[in-house]
Image: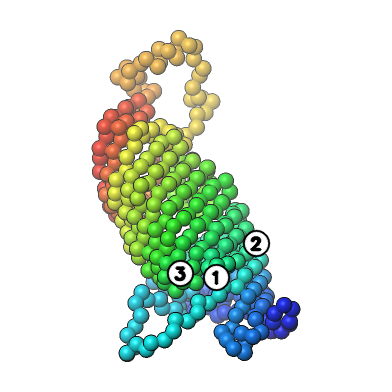
Amino acid sequence: PIHLDYDRGLKVTAQNISVANTDWGEAEHIATVDQSVATVQPASLLFGPVTVTRLNVQGATVNLEQNAEGAQNWAANTALTSEPQNRGTPQTAAAPEPMALPDVTLANIDLRYHDLATSASQNVRIENGTLTTQDNVTSFQTVGAFNDSPYETSGTVTALIEMLGGKSGELDVTSTLEDSTLALQGTIESIPNNVFNLSVTGDVTDLPALLAIAKTRMDLPVTAVKVQSNIMGKRDTFDLRNVNLALDDTQVTGNLSIVQGDLLQISGDIEADTLDLNTLLAERDAPATKQNAPQAKSKTEADTETNTTPAEVDSNTAKVFSSSPLPLDDMALVTGDISIKAKTVLYENMTLTDLASVVTLQD
């Protein structure tokens, strides 16, 4: 049903709205809305264009689905192209006025993504959200949950309408999930062609917990991650420049190029002054039990053990390689060549200096 009311503008209330899904989709509807209230300028109904000044949406569910062929239900009836089609002799006409964005209030919105081929799913719930635009700068803030874990996102977007139409705009966003933060600043040249140049800053205090929230299969031994990088994208290619990555106590810098396809192609170079694998892989070794837990040593015993050279260590008690395998199973869909340089590599009883190697990943 649709209701009309007048209070500082014409209010149009629509309830129980639904949009049918594609014939191959699993969900019955792409979107359902319990209630939407739009405030319209009355004069715009007579003289056009219709101007909505405020929009309030309560209780909505959006089902985004992708099938095994890569088709997406939200793109089923849209076609974005980077160049306009030639439709004959162009006519001279005044450029239309850019559409004004209304102030938007959101409550209890569920965004659900489902990959029908892999059964992977992600859920974002917006408990409360606001979006306001002034002088072509759109400010937004949302509070909710990502896969049942609380998050907050806020930021600004300059020229949002132009960006959605394929033109450039500025982005400044900060998000928090649990105790981790991610900040993005930069320029998006074209949303349809995935062209952007962003500066990324991230601070992850508990990476395993964050990966569990995102429902990833990857089992990484690193706990804390801090990252700074410039990311440039164009269609399916992404360049990470001036990467500064802190993995626990290990600092890594470099440049990487990533190409998306059936396989993820990664190439580039990374460097580190000290690559401490004992820290990075410590979480993968089984914890000590009462039977094999190290016993307290006297100062004399400790000093003697400290001065022992690797050649003198008993082969029955010392390990050269970790008893737990490296997390390589999840690399099956990744190919590429990565150059690695480190002045010092520490691992168990070994110390390598001036390491230079090329790691090749193949299917």
Nearer the N terminus, badge 2 or badge 3? 2
Classify 10 Å Cα crowding around label 3: few (below 14), some (14-19), many (20 and above). some
Q: Residue at x 59, y 55 (%)?
A: 152
Which residue is tagged 3? 163
Which residue is tagged 2? 127
The secondary element bearing badge 2 is classed as: strand
The secondary element bearing badge 1 is classed as: strand
The secondary element bearing badge 3 is classed as: helix
User: In this rendering, which labeled residue sits more in front, label 1 or label 3?
Assistant: 3
Q: At which x and y percent is residue 276?
A: 38, 33
Task: Give me the C-alpha separation between circle 1 and circle 2.
Answer: 17 Å
Classify 10 Å Cα crowding around label 2: few (below 14), some (14-19), many (20 and above). some
Which residue is tagged 1? 63
Nearer the N terminus, badge 1 or badge 2? 1
- Name which residue type carries label 1: Asn
| Left or right: where 280 falls relative to 204 | left
Q: Residue at x 35, y 80 (%)?
A: 84
